[in-house]
Image (cartoon, helix red, strand yellow):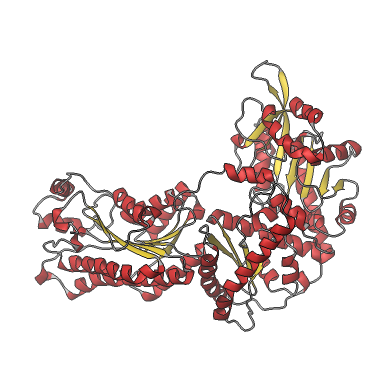
Amino acid sequence: MLDKQQGARLANLWDDVKAAKMSEAERLLYRSNLLGSDKRITNYGGGNTSAKVMEKDPLTGETAEVLWVKGSGGDVGTIKMDGFATLYMDKLRAMKGIYRGVEFEDEMVGYLPHCTFNLNPRAASIDTPLHAYVPKTHVDHMHPDAIIAVAASKNSKELTKRIFGDEIGWLPWKRPGYELGLWLEKYCLENPKARGVVLESHGLFTWGDTAKQAYETTIEIINRAIAWFEAENTAPAFGGEAKPVLATSERVAIARKLMPVIRGLISAEEKKVGHFDDSTAVLDFVTSTNLEPLAALGTSCPDHFLRTKIRPLVVDFDPTQPDVEKTLAGLPEAIAAYRADYARYYERCKRADSPAMRDPNAVVYLVPGVGMITFAKDKATARISGEFYVNAINVMRGASGVSTYVGLPEQEAFDIEYWLLEEAKLQRMPKPKSLAGRIALVTGGAGGIGKATASRLMQEGACVVLADIDEAALETAQSELAARYGKDFVRSVSMNVTSEAAVESGFGDALLAFGGLDILVSNAGLASSAAIEDTTLALWNKNIDILATGYFLVSREAFRIFRSQKAGGNVVFVASKNGLAASPGASAYCTAKAAEIHLARCLALEGASAQIRVNVVNPDAVLRGSKIWSGEWKEQRAAAYKMDVDDLEAHYRERSMLKLSVVPEDIAEAIYFLASDMSAKSTGNIVNVDAGNAQSFTR
């Protein structure tokens, strides 16, 4: 079997009724989205689609043949109409007249903008000639696991013939580019009845006269490969099981311990975010006899390789005698050895004009009996890298089961990784945001200040874990932030900060979600008002439990993670003006808030030697969006000041020196400042965000 769906056939999802109402370009979009909806066909960002469409030239008014093709960096599963590049076919054909040969094929990319139709700003990809020169109207280029398993087999040409006869041809490995486009054209002209081509170590090209025919051909050919492997690949996967799969709870516990340590060891130059995968396909591989020799061969398909590096790092862990501490102790040496090996690979393969060596750390970490951990510059990239390696695992399962699996030759792999065109694309990428790669946990994350803080941190590129005791509000907050910034950037955990077990569990879930922690915003709170003689012990203890003990528990857990990462850390307490300035009828609240502030000072002293900064933001009267102020606290404070509830915000505004209301976004801005490198040399500080209150001046 080639994937976790147990050899299930791809469904034909084409809907004639829907398609009939579409233009030719819209049917291309429809076809693309259908193909990209199943990772067995192609992974995120992999493959491309095209259609040659007759269009009215906006300048001459005459009809012109236009190539619509997926633009550079796009994803067929999520692409929209503006994701396609459009180019004049007559100009693309004219490029043949200036082609100087394979040694100069990269320069042809510079001519593609001269072929642009209708001033389309979408950049054309390196694969454009492959689609342009196939003399068919509709062309699909996909990276299906089942086909790449054929393409990555030692005898791939023979297997292609055996499975598909003369319907599908075969071409030897050639790096994507202009020359390969000419190869495809030549094959099609010499084999007019062929329906597609398998590219060695790469993927599948198929075509048709209509969008529907191209789509159905792609589905049919992949299904035939799946069926063939199902019948032929009956040997135990990867040589059979050599080590046991640990129970889910054990796998999760081990991953939680490994991830922050690995992250700390590989984040010196750039903060990384992690992803954990213990799916069936991964577990089959990491428990197998042939894990190490197969992993050492690397991947075959260029798209897989670019996402997962030359090869993974197999972590030294024995699930038959699990000793996590031994593994943790060995990680620094193992990661250093990987970096040294990568540097040797670079030196062996570099060319005179190669870009400087990039990050030498592994992307993929395979843990026997446990699963796969991937690290990248952000969560989406880490997740997608893991998905690509699962594709690679499926390919190795198929190829090694019917033949000998062959990875991409080292020099070819290097030439793709350090391709000058790829380097130019990397150089064009926007500068990372100020908190890119940072991971934050915000307690009280579903409330006004907490949600505003999470939003502000995510706006700057951080991944955020929302922690709150209110599960309904948590779900709403996570949905809102995911819709605004992307679901990869936010997670939520139910957490009662007064429970030691709940805090440890919540932080563990955060580690599993993102691989580590950089920022703790301790914001969970409550408010109470009562004269001292009416303050019950229960009320007193509730304030101390949440506002003092709770802050201690989450800080202790954060410090443990920071120290395991050995990469510093950042704690921001959300205290209150009342922690510095006494207030009538709120002794329990004021005392607990004062304890918070002093705890922060103590932690700043303890954390400084490990580059752990601890600072405080003191809000005052943040009524808007606050769960605290939506309850009886608002009524109690209004009663204390002998006024209507509706007059309370105006009262606080007029009481302030600046005569301004304070809103959650104001607090979030101060928290962002303290959590960012803008305050890199500040610790043990208090920032008042109260519109001015002389009583709470810190000095």
217, 135: nearer the viewer:
135
Q: Residue sitting at 65 percent across and 67 percent down?
A: 338
679, 135: nearer the viewer:
679
Residue 252 lies, with reference to residue 398, above or below; the image says below
Q: Quadrant of residue 230?
A: bottom right
182, 162: nearer the viewer:
182
Residue 598, horizontal then vertical, whole percent: 24, 68
Q: Quadrant of residue 6?
A: bottom right
Q: Quadrant of residue 471?
A: bottom left
- Left or right relative to 265: residue 534: left
Question: In the picture, which quadrant includes the N terminus?
Answer: bottom right
Residue 323, horizontal then vertical, whole percent: 58, 82
Residue 333, horizontal then vertical, whole percent: 60, 73
Residue 577, horizontal then vertical, whole percent: 20, 58
Residue 163 lies, with reference to residue 660, above or below; the image says below
Q: Residue sitting at 62 percent across and 84 percent down?
A: 321
